[in-house]
């Protein structure tokens, strides 16, 4: 036990919260907490779990890391100090940051460089299958939920957890850490455990960590003494909701000072047409139809005012699973107005003037998610083409779902 306050502080600013290397080969688990500095629950949860594993070691297979995110922002309890650390993980931004000198780096540039180095080291020295988990919390009340980039490996692993799953958030956010990991083809789940300050958010992250360790085979399920309790806790906390949802709309903020969310909304709350949602300058923003509100913003920092979501019907999940397994999406470039955007053939360029008959849901089914380039073109990235399915093919959770459902 560390009692010296200076030492304690030194411990709290260490990048690595914990690392456990098992005696047998197995998966590599990488957990991040506090990529947003005002979201401490994940850090506290990881400290707790790694401490418990250190105090009473279990037989482990593979390797597990807990990584602290934005340390300077965590120390100040702020989302970020100069720029959002979870919006700068694009290849061009990373290249740009690496090209700058240390003196030119912003606070978050430095954090990116340090975390990037840790990730590269792990990928170089450890063996797969790799699992990346990123812990967050929200400013509003919410059910705990998982966010994933829409690749089948992510869907299948995420489905093991008894909480709602949000697909396609990558279309709306630029440069989150997990999109960077996903582009490398690994399983990557974001877990939003609840509201920032709630104790339940810590408990949910602790439960999620143990379940990940069991589901990935890092620990034997039977060795996780409270497995059933953890599972039950997440189930209850999520109101027994484990549906898939799609983002339908993102309310982007140009200036957060112009925006005020109406009080009292919680994520996953159903609202009827005409409900006032927010005030922006002098405009009252109302729901244009019956919808579900998601991540309403109740804090001073952020780029999104709120999102609207809809439940993904199971037929769409099943059909898209089938189409992706048959690799139908790889044929789209022969269609008029559609061409490969890069040599690696991971991205499609769509001319909307020519290919206007293809709607977004059509591309979604095949695993493509888009980013708008200009008025007449958008680029579609296919998570399936980059996903390292081979790496996960022999895991129990990949195999059980191969011939059915998603
Ligand atoms: Zn966050």
Image (tube, helix red, strand yellow):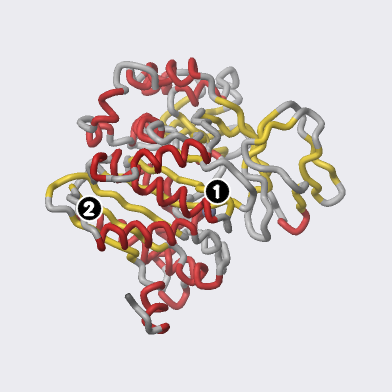
Residue 194, labelled with which disc?
1
Label 2: which secondary element: strand
Q: Is residue 294 above or below residue 82?
A: above
Instruction: Answer few, some or many: residues within 10 Å of disc 1's Cα (few below 14, many 20 plus, some between 14 and 19).
Output: many
Q: CA distance from mark 2 to mark 1?
A: 27 Å
At a point 45% along the width and 45% down the height, the residue shown is: 190
At a point 47% along the width and 22% down the height, the residue shown is: 365
The answer to whether one can see residue 106 in this image is no
Say left or right for 123 vs 237.
Answer: left
View extreme (left): residue: 24
Residue 339, labelled with which disc?
none
Query: Which quarter of the picture shows residue 390?
Result: top left
**Quadrant location of the C terminus?**
top left
Position in image of residue 188 (x %, y %) = 38, 43
The answer to whether one can see residue 216 in this image is yes
What residue did someone put label 2 on? 63
Position in image of residue 355 (x %, y %) = 55, 21
Disc 1 CB within 8 Å of nearest ligand 1 atom: no
Label 1: which secondary element: strand
Q: Is residue 380 above or below residue 45?
A: above
At a point 81% along the width and 39% down the height, the residue shown is: 276
Q: Nearer the viewer, residue 232 or 211?
A: 232
Of circles 2 and 1, the one toward us is 1
Q: Nearer the viewer, residue 98 or 124?
A: 124
At a point 14% along the width and 47% down the height, the residue shown is: 25
For marks 2 and 1 on the same chain, the one whose residue lies earlier in the sequence? 2
Position in image of residue 294 (x %, y %) = 63, 39
Disc 2 CB within 8 Å of nearest ligand 1 atom: no
């Amino acid at each position: 036990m560390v009692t010296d306050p200076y030492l304690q502080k030194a411990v709290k600013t260490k990048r690595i919260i914990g690392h456990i290397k098992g005696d047998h080969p197995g998966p590599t688990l990488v957990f991040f907490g506090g990529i947003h500095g005002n979201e401490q629950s994940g850090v506290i949860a990881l400290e707790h779990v790694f401490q418990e594993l250190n105090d009473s070691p279990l037989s482990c297979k593979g390797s597990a890391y807990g990584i602290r995110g934005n340390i300077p922002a965590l120390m100040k309890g702020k989302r970020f100090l100069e720029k959002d650390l979870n919006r700068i993980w694009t290849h061009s931004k990373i290249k740009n940051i690496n090209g700058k000198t240390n003196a030119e780096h912003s606070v978050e540039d430095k954090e990116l460089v340090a975390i990037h180095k840790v990730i590269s080291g792990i990928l170089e020295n450890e063996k797969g299958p790799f699992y990346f988990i990123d812990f967050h919390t929200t400013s509003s009340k919410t059910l705990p939920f998982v966010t994933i980039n829409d690749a089948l490996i992510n869907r299948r692993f995420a489905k093991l957890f008894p909480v709602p799953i949000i697909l396609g958030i990558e279309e709306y956010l630029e440069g989150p850490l997990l999109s960077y990991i996903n582009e490398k083809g690994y399983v990557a789940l974001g877990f939003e455990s609840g509201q920032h300050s709630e104790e339940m958010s810590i408990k949910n992250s602790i439960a999620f960590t143990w379940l990940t360790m069991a589901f990935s085979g890092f620990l034997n399920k039977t060795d996780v003494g409270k497995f059933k309790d953890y599972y039950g806790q997440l189930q209850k906390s999520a109101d027994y909701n484990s549906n898939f949802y799609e983002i339908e709309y993102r309310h982007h903020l140009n200036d957060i000072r112009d925006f005020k969310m109406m009080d009292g909304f919680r994520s996953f709350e159903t609202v009827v047409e005409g409900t006032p949602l927010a005030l922006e300058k002098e405009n009252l923003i109302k729901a244009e139809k019956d919808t579900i509100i998601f991540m309403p913003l109740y804090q001073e920092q952020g780029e999104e005012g709120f999102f609207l979501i809809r439940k993904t019907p199971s037929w769409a999940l099943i059909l898209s699973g089938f189409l992706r397994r048959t690799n139908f999406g790889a044929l789209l470039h022969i269609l008029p107005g559609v061409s490969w955007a890069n040599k690696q053939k991971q991205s499609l360029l769509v001319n909307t003037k020519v290919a206007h008959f293809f709607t977004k849901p059509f591309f979604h089914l095949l695993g493509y998610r888009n980013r708008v380039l200009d008025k007449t073109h958008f680029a579609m990235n296919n998570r399936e083409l980059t996903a390292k399915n081979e790496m996960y093919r022999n895991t129990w959770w990949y195999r059980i779902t191969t011939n059915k459902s998603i």
